[in-house]
Amino acid sequence: MSEIFNFCAGPAMLPKAVMEKAQREFINWQSTGSSVMELSHRSSIYMDMAKQAELDLRELMSIPDNYHVLFCHGGGRGQFSAVPLNLLPQGKTADYIISGSWSKAAAIEAQKFGNINTVDITLSGEQTSVLPSKDWQLTPDAAYVHYCPNETVNGIEIFEIPETNGVPLVADMSSTILSHEIDVSKFGLIYAGAQKNIGPSGLTIVIVRDDLVGHEQPATPCIMNYKTSADNDSMYNTPPTYAWYLAGVVFKWLKEQGGVKAIATINQAKADLLYKAIDQSTFYQNNIIDQYRSKMNVPFWLKDETLNYQFLKEAEHAGLTALKGHRIVGGMRASIYNAMPIEGVQALVEFMQQFEERNM
Ligand code: PMP
């Protein structure tokens, strides 16, 4: 079979080297005679691996010592509930910045648990844009400000870190974590479902400043309670052991690539290549303003939408899979996370140009 480049938004492709290592170790991990997924999470060999994965993530993101790193269940949506349950006391308000469909979904869920003030920053016009963070109307004494730096569906990425004047900043980084360097100390809490830049689905990473832990609402379920998780090294209940292991293999792979700084350079080159191809053509378009164009999820539209089906069929035939845009926005979407090699984007651009020539 010739090479397949999978542009799925998530679960997304994983680095080939990671999959090959996992395959080699699948049945007999570290000479135990068992698969890693068959071992107790409390066995010392598993706990050593789990700890090492945390240390590697800490190193990759330069996570300060006063932050807990939690390996949780429940995906991004699990955190839509866990964040207000843990961080929003009765009588306080949390600000939710709305820049697309995932931040909106987070706000809707949070409304079940307390007072939520939504701040819509989307600006529509000929080009889609968002209000710069210095102009966001925030509640001065909010419990926290929640935003989504990369809207996976809409393809809008906010690169600047908002200034919240001491109010804890909470970020849903599901589709941008580890794609470029960030200063973790500017955030109160960062969360990310694993299935894009970390590993397989089933695992969610939460990075939380320690002073924010231990103030949960009384009805917070134990498995969503950050303090319970932190006190038990993320093993209060059985963690998603295989996903945790595979995340650890991804972290090692990323270190071998030169870390987040090195992968960011490649991510920039991939995004530049694809946006340039879109902008230079009159056949394809992406109407998001340059400054807020996502480097991870690139939506684009064929000017003649009647060709959508043909485009997808021929792309699939050429080994370029999962390019269909999300049903909310239509068109196409190329997700080009860390694991997508530049060769994949080159193949896509070449295919797009050939398709255009055939259908002009
Ligand atoms: N937030 C963002 C930014 C996402 O992209 C997604 C999933 N694509 C979610 C949250 C929801 O994640 P999950 O399906 O793991 O609950």
Image: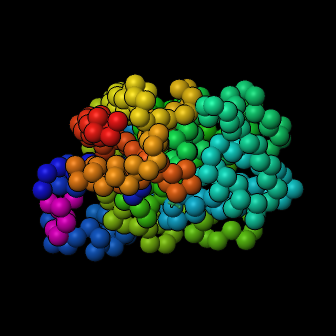
Q: In the rendered view, does 200 fall on the left or right side of 249?
A: right
Quarter of the picture containing the C terminus is top left
Q: In the rendered view, does 199 fall on the left or right side of 234?
A: left
Q: Position of residue 61 (x, y in %)?
A: 44, 37
Q: In the rendered view, does 15 fall on the left or right side of 138?
A: left
Classify 227 as above or below 338: below
- Most extreme residue toward the left is 1
Span of residues in magenta = 22-29
Classify 346 as above or below 173: above
x 73%, y 71%: residue: 219
Q: Is residue 349 visible?
A: no
Q: Position of residue 302 (x, y in %)?
A: 44, 42
Classify 81 as above or below 103: below
Q: How many numbered circles does the render carry?
A: 0
Q: Is residue 24 magenta?
A: yes
x 65%, y 42%: residue: 99
Q: Position of residue 303 (x, y in %)?
A: 47, 39
- Most extreme residue toward the front is 360
